[in-house]
Amino acid sequence: MKKEYTKLKWYRFKIARRIWNLEGKELLAELEDIIQDIRDKKLDKLGVFQLQLRELENMIDELKIKPKAKTRVHDPFHIPASGDGRIALFGLSNVGKSTLMNAITNTDVKIGAYLHTTRVAHAGTLEYENLKIQIIDVPGFLDFKDDWGVNRQIVRVARTSDAIMMVIDLSLDIDRQYNFLMQQLEDSKLVVDGETHYKLSIIATKGDLPGSEEKFSKLKEITSLPICPVSIKFDDSLENLKKALFEQLEIIRIYTKKPGQKADLEQPFVLPEGGTITDVAERIHTSFLSRFRFARVWGPSAEFEGQQVGLDHTLADTDIVELVVER
Protein backbone atom coordinates (compact mmCIF):
# COMPACT_ATOMS: atom_id res chain seq x y z
CA MET A 1 0.00 0.00 0.00
CA LYS A 2 2.84 2.41 0.79
CA LYS A 3 4.21 1.89 -2.73
CA GLU A 4 0.77 2.73 -4.18
CA TYR A 5 0.58 5.97 -2.17
CA THR A 6 4.06 6.96 -3.36
CA LYS A 7 2.97 6.35 -6.95
CA LEU A 8 -0.16 8.48 -6.41
CA LYS A 9 1.88 11.26 -4.77
CA TRP A 10 4.21 11.42 -7.78
CA TYR A 11 1.26 11.31 -10.20
CA ARG A 12 -0.50 14.18 -8.37
CA PHE A 13 2.73 16.17 -8.57
CA LYS A 14 2.60 15.76 -12.37
CA ILE A 15 -1.12 16.63 -12.53
CA ALA A 16 -0.57 19.91 -10.68
CA ARG A 17 2.04 20.99 -13.19
CA ARG A 18 -0.04 19.92 -16.20
CA ILE A 19 -3.06 22.02 -15.24
CA TRP A 20 -1.32 25.11 -13.84
CA ASN A 21 -2.71 28.28 -15.47
CA LEU A 22 -5.13 26.38 -17.74
CA GLU A 23 -8.73 27.54 -18.05
CA GLY A 24 -11.90 26.71 -19.96
CA LYS A 25 -11.67 24.28 -22.85
CA GLU A 26 -7.91 23.83 -22.44
CA LEU A 27 -8.34 22.77 -18.81
CA LEU A 28 -11.26 20.48 -19.70
CA ALA A 29 -9.26 18.74 -22.43
CA GLU A 30 -6.26 18.30 -20.14
CA LEU A 31 -8.38 16.79 -17.34
CA GLU A 32 -9.99 14.34 -19.76
CA ASP A 33 -6.56 13.39 -21.09
CA ILE A 34 -5.29 12.77 -17.53
CA ILE A 35 -8.27 10.49 -16.77
CA GLN A 36 -7.60 8.54 -19.96
CA ASP A 37 -3.92 8.26 -19.06
CA ILE A 38 -4.83 6.80 -15.65
CA ARG A 39 -7.06 4.21 -17.32
CA ASP A 40 -4.56 3.39 -20.09
CA LYS A 41 -1.90 2.70 -17.46
CA LYS A 42 -4.47 0.66 -15.47
CA LEU A 43 -3.81 2.82 -12.42
CA ASP A 44 -7.57 2.88 -11.84
CA LYS A 45 -7.20 -0.71 -10.65
CA LEU A 46 -5.34 0.62 -7.60
CA GLY A 47 -7.64 1.59 -4.75
CA VAL A 48 -5.82 4.79 -3.89
CA PHE A 49 -6.47 6.17 -7.39
CA GLN A 50 -10.28 5.86 -7.12
CA LEU A 51 -10.68 9.07 -5.12
CA GLN A 52 -8.33 10.85 -7.51
CA LEU A 53 -10.52 9.83 -10.47
CA ARG A 54 -13.67 11.04 -8.70
CA GLU A 55 -12.03 14.37 -8.01
CA LEU A 56 -11.02 14.83 -11.66
CA GLU A 57 -14.52 13.89 -12.81
CA ASN A 58 -16.05 16.42 -10.39
CA MET A 59 -13.78 19.14 -11.78
CA ILE A 60 -14.92 18.25 -15.31
CA ASP A 61 -18.60 18.37 -14.28
CA GLU A 62 -18.11 21.84 -12.77
CA LEU A 63 -16.43 23.09 -15.94
CA LYS A 64 -19.21 21.74 -18.16
CA ILE A 65 -22.06 23.37 -16.22
CA LYS A 66 -20.29 26.71 -15.84
CA PRO A 67 -22.01 29.30 -18.10
CA LYS A 68 -19.93 30.80 -20.87
CA ALA A 69 -18.81 34.35 -20.23
CA LYS A 70 -19.55 36.80 -23.04
CA THR A 71 -16.51 38.89 -22.24
CA ARG A 72 -13.36 38.25 -20.26
CA VAL A 73 -13.52 39.92 -16.85
CA HIS A 74 -10.97 40.27 -14.10
CA ASP A 75 -10.94 37.26 -11.81
CA PRO A 76 -9.82 38.40 -8.31
CA PHE A 77 -9.21 34.79 -7.35
CA HIS A 78 -7.04 33.76 -10.31
CA ILE A 79 -3.37 33.59 -9.33
CA PRO A 80 -0.89 31.84 -11.65
CA ALA A 81 1.08 29.17 -9.83
CA SER A 82 4.79 29.71 -9.30
CA GLY A 83 7.68 28.44 -7.24
CA ASP A 84 8.37 24.94 -5.96
CA GLY A 85 5.01 24.44 -4.27
CA ARG A 86 1.71 26.21 -3.60
CA ILE A 87 -0.06 26.37 -0.23
CA ALA A 88 -3.48 27.91 0.47
CA LEU A 89 -4.31 29.48 3.84
CA PHE A 90 -7.91 28.46 4.54
CA GLY A 91 -9.92 29.81 7.46
CA LEU A 92 -12.70 32.00 8.84
CA SER A 93 -12.50 35.76 8.59
CA ASN A 94 -10.18 37.64 10.95
CA VAL A 95 -8.26 34.62 12.30
CA GLY A 96 -4.84 36.04 11.37
CA LYS A 97 -4.18 34.65 7.88
CA SER A 98 -3.06 37.96 6.38
CA THR A 99 -0.90 38.77 9.41
CA LEU A 100 0.84 35.42 8.98
CA MET A 101 1.22 36.08 5.27
CA ASN A 102 2.99 39.37 5.91
CA ALA A 103 5.26 37.78 8.53
CA ILE A 104 6.60 34.92 6.41
CA THR A 105 6.50 36.19 2.81
CA ASN A 106 7.51 39.20 0.73
CA THR A 107 3.99 40.67 0.70
CA ASP A 108 2.18 43.47 2.54
CA VAL A 109 -1.45 42.39 2.65
CA LYS A 110 -3.89 44.84 4.24
CA ILE A 111 -4.90 43.74 7.74
CA GLY A 112 -7.50 44.99 10.19
CA ALA A 113 -9.49 44.03 13.27
CA TYR A 114 -12.75 43.66 11.34
CA LEU A 115 -14.35 40.97 9.20
CA HIS A 116 -13.51 40.49 5.52
CA THR A 117 -10.44 42.73 5.47
CA THR A 118 -9.12 40.51 2.65
CA ARG A 119 -11.57 40.53 -0.28
CA VAL A 120 -9.45 39.00 -3.04
CA ALA A 121 -6.79 36.30 -3.21
CA HIS A 122 -3.20 37.41 -2.57
CA ALA A 123 0.01 35.54 -3.33
CA GLY A 124 3.37 35.82 -1.65
CA THR A 125 6.65 33.94 -1.80
CA LEU A 126 8.15 32.19 1.19
CA GLU A 127 11.88 31.63 0.69
CA TYR A 128 13.05 28.63 2.69
CA GLU A 129 16.42 26.88 2.29
CA ASN A 130 16.80 27.29 -1.48
CA LEU A 131 13.07 26.83 -2.11
CA LYS A 132 10.44 29.32 -3.21
CA ILE A 133 7.02 28.37 -1.85
CA GLN A 134 3.94 30.25 -3.05
CA ILE A 135 1.54 31.11 -0.22
CA ILE A 136 -2.04 32.05 -1.15
CA ASP A 137 -4.12 34.14 1.25
CA VAL A 138 -7.81 33.94 0.35
CA PRO A 139 -10.74 35.85 1.91
CA GLY A 140 -11.93 34.36 5.16
CA PHE A 141 -15.24 32.50 5.35
CA LEU A 142 -18.20 34.10 7.12
CA ASP A 143 -19.90 31.13 8.74
CA PHE A 144 -22.98 33.19 9.71
CA LYS A 145 -23.60 34.32 6.14
CA ASP A 146 -24.78 32.23 3.21
CA ASP A 147 -22.26 33.44 0.63
CA TRP A 148 -21.54 30.27 -1.31
CA GLY A 149 -20.57 32.31 -4.39
CA VAL A 150 -17.49 33.60 -2.57
CA ASN A 151 -16.98 30.35 -0.67
CA ARG A 152 -16.87 28.40 -3.93
CA GLN A 153 -14.14 30.72 -5.24
CA ILE A 154 -12.13 30.20 -2.05
CA VAL A 155 -12.44 26.43 -2.46
CA ARG A 156 -11.38 26.71 -6.11
CA VAL A 157 -8.11 28.31 -5.05
CA ALA A 158 -7.59 25.59 -2.44
CA ARG A 159 -8.16 22.90 -5.07
CA THR A 160 -5.35 24.27 -7.25
CA SER A 161 -2.88 24.16 -4.36
CA ASP A 162 -0.45 21.43 -3.36
CA ALA A 163 -1.43 21.75 0.28
CA ILE A 164 -4.17 23.36 2.36
CA MET A 165 -3.41 24.85 5.77
CA MET A 166 -6.53 25.47 7.85
CA VAL A 167 -5.91 28.52 10.03
CA ILE A 168 -7.65 28.33 13.41
CA ASP A 169 -7.64 31.15 15.96
CA LEU A 170 -6.91 29.86 19.48
CA SER A 171 -8.72 32.85 21.01
CA LEU A 172 -12.06 31.86 19.42
CA ASP A 173 -14.44 28.87 19.53
CA ILE A 174 -12.36 25.89 18.38
CA ASP A 175 -15.26 23.53 17.60
CA ARG A 176 -17.09 26.16 15.56
CA GLN A 177 -14.07 26.93 13.38
CA TYR A 178 -12.91 23.36 12.84
CA ASN A 179 -16.37 21.93 12.08
CA PHE A 180 -17.22 24.72 9.65
CA LEU A 181 -13.95 24.40 7.71
CA MET A 182 -14.24 20.62 7.49
CA GLN A 183 -17.82 21.02 6.23
CA GLN A 184 -16.57 23.33 3.46
CA LEU A 185 -13.99 20.74 2.43
CA GLU A 186 -16.62 17.99 2.41
CA ASP A 187 -19.21 20.06 0.51
CA SER A 188 -16.63 20.83 -2.18
CA LYS A 189 -15.54 17.16 -2.39
CA LEU A 190 -12.01 17.98 -1.26
CA VAL A 191 -12.69 15.49 1.53
CA VAL A 192 -14.85 12.45 0.67
CA ASP A 193 -16.01 10.01 3.35
CA GLY A 194 -13.32 11.32 5.66
CA GLU A 195 -10.54 10.73 3.12
CA THR A 196 -8.55 13.13 0.99
CA HIS A 197 -5.51 13.12 -1.25
CA TYR A 198 -4.79 16.74 -0.42
CA LYS A 199 -2.12 17.55 2.11
CA LEU A 200 -4.13 18.97 5.01
CA SER A 201 -2.92 20.39 8.30
CA ILE A 202 -3.69 23.17 10.76
CA ILE A 203 -1.98 26.40 11.78
CA ALA A 204 -3.14 27.44 15.25
CA THR A 205 -2.70 31.22 15.54
CA LYS A 206 -2.48 33.61 18.51
CA GLY A 207 -0.74 31.04 20.67
CA ASP A 208 0.59 33.78 22.94
CA LEU A 209 -2.82 34.87 24.25
CA PRO A 210 -4.24 33.82 27.66
CA GLY A 211 -6.12 30.54 27.46
CA SER A 212 -4.46 29.46 24.23
CA GLU A 213 -2.82 26.39 25.77
CA GLU A 214 -6.21 25.02 26.85
CA LYS A 215 -7.69 25.69 23.40
CA PHE A 216 -4.69 24.03 21.75
CA SER A 217 -5.17 20.91 23.88
CA LYS A 218 -8.83 20.79 22.86
CA LEU A 219 -7.94 21.15 19.19
CA LYS A 220 -5.60 18.16 19.46
CA GLU A 221 -8.48 16.13 20.92
CA ILE A 222 -10.91 16.76 18.05
CA THR A 223 -8.57 16.22 15.09
CA SER A 224 -5.85 13.86 13.95
CA LEU A 225 -4.44 16.42 11.50
CA PRO A 226 -0.94 17.82 12.14
CA ILE A 227 -1.09 21.13 14.04
CA CYS A 228 1.53 23.89 14.09
CA PRO A 229 0.97 26.47 16.86
CA VAL A 230 2.29 29.93 16.04
CA SER A 231 2.63 33.43 17.45
CA ILE A 232 3.93 36.21 15.19
CA LYS A 233 5.54 37.80 18.25
CA PHE A 234 8.23 35.12 18.42
CA ASP A 235 10.79 34.52 15.67
CA ASP A 236 11.32 30.89 16.69
CA SER A 237 7.61 30.27 16.26
CA LEU A 238 7.69 31.69 12.72
CA GLU A 239 10.73 29.59 11.83
CA ASN A 240 8.92 26.48 13.06
CA LEU A 241 5.98 27.44 10.85
CA LYS A 242 8.20 27.82 7.78
CA LYS A 243 9.62 24.36 8.41
CA ALA A 244 6.11 22.94 8.86
CA LEU A 245 4.99 24.48 5.54
CA PHE A 246 7.97 22.90 3.78
CA GLU A 247 7.26 19.51 5.36
CA GLN A 248 3.59 19.78 4.42
CA LEU A 249 4.49 19.82 0.73
CA GLU A 250 6.25 16.44 1.05
CA ILE A 251 8.98 17.42 -1.39
CA ILE A 252 12.73 16.89 -1.38
CA ARG A 253 15.66 18.99 -2.64
CA ILE A 254 18.20 17.16 -4.77
CA TYR A 255 21.49 18.83 -5.69
CA THR A 256 23.62 17.68 -8.61
CA LYS A 257 27.29 17.70 -9.56
CA LYS A 258 29.25 16.91 -12.67
CA PRO A 259 32.07 14.33 -12.39
CA GLY A 260 35.18 15.99 -11.04
CA GLN A 261 33.39 19.22 -10.13
CA LYS A 262 31.80 20.68 -7.01
CA ALA A 263 28.07 20.32 -6.40
CA ASP A 264 25.65 23.13 -7.22
CA LEU A 265 24.19 23.83 -3.77
CA GLU A 266 22.14 26.85 -4.82
CA GLN A 267 19.51 25.51 -7.23
CA PRO A 268 18.16 22.08 -6.32
CA PHE A 269 15.89 19.86 -8.36
CA VAL A 270 12.59 19.57 -6.48
CA LEU A 271 10.93 16.15 -6.39
CA PRO A 272 8.08 14.63 -4.37
CA GLU A 273 9.13 12.37 -1.51
CA GLY A 274 9.97 8.93 -2.91
CA GLY A 275 11.72 10.40 -5.96
CA THR A 276 14.45 8.30 -7.57
CA ILE A 277 17.56 8.64 -9.71
CA THR A 278 15.28 8.09 -12.72
CA ASP A 279 13.39 11.28 -11.88
CA VAL A 280 16.60 13.30 -11.65
CA ALA A 281 17.89 11.90 -14.95
CA GLU A 282 14.61 12.80 -16.69
CA ARG A 283 14.77 16.35 -15.33
CA ILE A 284 18.32 16.88 -16.64
CA HIS A 285 17.76 15.36 -20.09
CA THR A 286 15.62 12.48 -21.34
CA SER A 287 18.63 11.03 -23.21
CA PHE A 288 20.31 10.39 -19.85
CA LEU A 289 18.04 7.41 -19.27
CA SER A 290 19.16 5.54 -22.41
CA ARG A 291 22.81 6.50 -21.81
CA PHE A 292 22.79 5.88 -18.05
CA ARG A 293 25.64 3.83 -16.55
CA PHE A 294 25.38 4.54 -12.83
CA ALA A 295 25.05 7.35 -10.30
CA ARG A 296 26.92 8.33 -7.16
CA VAL A 297 25.09 9.70 -4.15
CA TRP A 298 26.25 11.74 -1.15
CA GLY A 299 23.77 12.46 1.61
CA PRO A 300 21.03 10.95 3.80
CA SER A 301 19.99 8.19 1.37
CA ALA A 302 23.53 6.88 0.84
CA GLU A 303 25.00 4.11 2.98
CA PHE A 304 28.37 5.80 2.55
CA GLU A 305 29.61 8.94 0.79
CA GLY A 306 29.76 8.54 -2.99
CA GLN A 307 27.76 5.29 -3.00
CA GLN A 308 27.25 3.91 -6.50
CA VAL A 309 23.56 3.30 -7.23
CA GLY A 310 21.13 2.51 -10.05
CA LEU A 311 18.07 4.23 -11.49
CA ASP A 312 15.67 2.83 -8.88
CA HIS A 313 17.57 4.25 -5.88
CA THR A 314 15.18 6.25 -3.66
CA LEU A 315 16.54 9.67 -2.78
CA ALA A 316 16.23 11.78 0.38
CA ASP A 317 16.13 15.51 1.02
CA THR A 318 19.46 17.33 0.40
CA ASP A 319 21.09 14.37 -1.39
CA ILE A 320 23.83 15.23 -3.89
CA VAL A 321 23.72 13.20 -7.11
CA GLU A 322 26.36 12.66 -9.77
CA LEU A 323 25.18 10.95 -12.96
CA VAL A 324 27.63 8.98 -15.10
CA VAL A 325 26.43 8.37 -18.66
CA GLU A 326 27.83 6.95 -21.88
CA ARG A 327 29.15 9.54 -24.27
Image: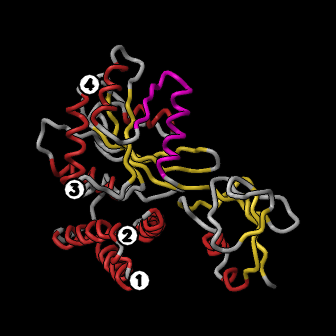
Name the front one of labels 3 and 2.
3
Tell me if residue 237 comes above or below residue 257 in the rendering.
Answer: above
How packed is label 1: few (under 14 Cα within 10 Å), some, or many (20 or more)? few
The residue carrying mark 1 is 41
Give the camera-side residue of 127 and 7.
Answer: 7
Q: Secondary structure at mark 4?
A: loop
Q: Earlier in the sequence, mark 2 or mark 1?
A: 2
Q: Is residue 133 magenta?
A: no
Amino acid identity at mark 2: Leu
* Residue carrying label 4: 172
Left or right for 174, reference 37? left
The disc, 1 or 4, on the residue closer to the chain's N-terminal end is: 1
Q: Position of residue 51 (x, y in %)?
A: 29, 65
Q: Which stretch did the figure color magenta?
A: 227-249
Q: What's under tag 3, amino acid-wise? A: Asp
Q: Say whether disc 4 or disc 2 marks the residue closer to the N-terminus.
A: 2
Q: Main secondary structure of the magenta part?
A: helix
How many angstroms separate mark 4 from mark 2 (CA)?
38 Å
| Residue designated by label 3 | 193
- The percent coordinates of residue 222 (x first, y second) are 27, 35
Q: Earlier in the sequence, mark 3 or mark 2?
A: 2
Q: Amino acid at mark 1?
A: Lys
Q: How many other residues sit within 10 Å of disc 2, few (<14), some (14-19) or many (≥20)?
A: few
> Which quadrant of the figure contains the N terminus?
bottom left
Mark 3–mark 1 Cα distance, whole angstroms, equals 26 Å
Numbered disc 1: secondary structure: loop
Q: Which residue is mark 2?
A: 22
Q: Nearer the viewer, mark 2 or mark 1?
A: 1
Q: Does residue 209 appear in the picture of this structure? A: yes
